[in-house]
Structures are given as structure tokens and as C-alpha cells.
Image (tube, rainbow, N blue to C red):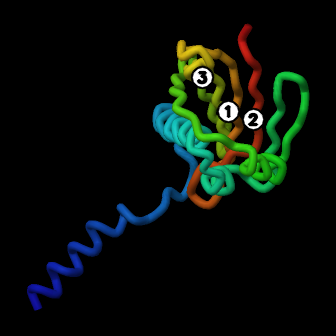
Amino acid sequence: MRVANVFVLTAIAVAPLHVPQAGPPRDSATARTQLLAIEAEIARANRDCDYKYFDRIEADEFIFTDATGKVTTKKEDLAGEKDCRKSESTQSLDEVIVQLHGGVAVLSARSSTTVAGRDGQSVTRRSRFTDVFVWRAGQWQLVAGHSSRIP
């Protein structure tokens, strides 16, 4: 009987660790941590051509607008896998701003991406981007994005 009680108490104590978060985080520090982890995964997926990650993180209605005004849908984005080439780039973010609006989060930041140039020298490109996330089924999902290169 004691063993059964210990098992039940252990199960009760551990159970909350496996329950997905019911609602979006209410404090910006938690949301910021979660969204920056997603942005790091997006950078990794871009380097590794991991389109399975994009299929999971992008909402079906996802749209991306580039600096020229061209709009890309999720379907079009995923179709780019065939042209993707893995890279050894590194990315860092700064000037990060996270705004919470209930179940919607807007993340804006400056990105610095460093790649090896054709002559072997490193080249750093900077851009500003905004990603919009919606809280769905216990996680953030990317619904829209925009990026513009900084000259």
C-alpha cells in the first residue's frame, strides 16, 4: 500500500511538468525567452535547409513580405526547399523589442548574419525584421513576417 501511495504522489508531482501551457505567457520576459528560442531555431533551420521546422512553426495562413513588397505564402516558402543550399553562417540579434497583445506577440529586431564571402573573407549583412506570432494549441505559431536589409 505504501508503494502505491508513493507512486500516486510521484505521479501527481510530476504531472504538471508534462501539461502544455494552457494560455500564452502573460509576462513579456517569458514571451521574449520563448520567441528568441524560436528565432534561433528559424536561423538554424535556414542554415540547415530544415523545411520540416518551417512547416511546423509557420501557420497555414503565413505570409512573408520582403523589402521589395513581394509577398510569399507558406506553400511558396516551403517550395523553396529544392533551391536551398546549406550554409555555415552565424546570426545574432540585437535591439529586440517584444510586444504582447493577449495571444499575439510581435517581435522586432536587428539581425546580423555573417557568411564566408567568395574571396574567403567574412561578410556581414544586417537587416531589420518583424515577426508576428499567434498562440495556438499551447505554442507560438508564426503568422507573418517582414524583413528589410540595412544598407
Give the residue at x 54% y 17%: 120
The reply to whether callout 3 and callout 1 are in contact (CB within 8 Å) is: yes
Q: Which quadrant is the N terminus positioned in? A: bottom left
**Residue extending furthest toward the front:** 119
Q: Label 3 crowding class (10 Å Cα cut-off): few <14, some 14-19, many 20+?
A: few
Q: Which quadrant would residue 63 be assigned to in this image? A: top right
Image position of 71 (left or right of 136): right
Query: Residue at the location (77% across, 47% down)?
Result: 80
**Quick one: label 3 or label 1, which is nearer the N terminus?**
3
Element type at marker 2?
strand
The single residue placed furthest to the left in the displayed view is 2
Q: Position of residue 143 (x, y in %)?
A: 75, 45
Instruction: Look at discs 1 and 2 and give the one toward the viewer.
Output: 2
Tell me the tag on residue 119: none
Residue indicated by mark 1: 106
Spatial CA span between label 2 and label 3: 14 Å
Residue at 76 percent of width and 20 percent of height: 148
Q: Nearer the viewer, residue 24 or 74?
A: 74
Q: Check the image and report above or below for 37 versus 123.
A: below
Residue where numbered disc 3 is placed: 97
Q: How far apart in space, not on screen, are marks 1 and 2 (Cα)? A: 10 Å
Earlier along the polypeptide chain: callout 2 or callout 3?
3
Comes first in the chain, label 1 or label 2: 1
Question: Which quadrant is home to the C terminus?
Answer: top right
Location of mark 2 (residue): 145
Which x, y percent locates residue 116?
A: 55, 21
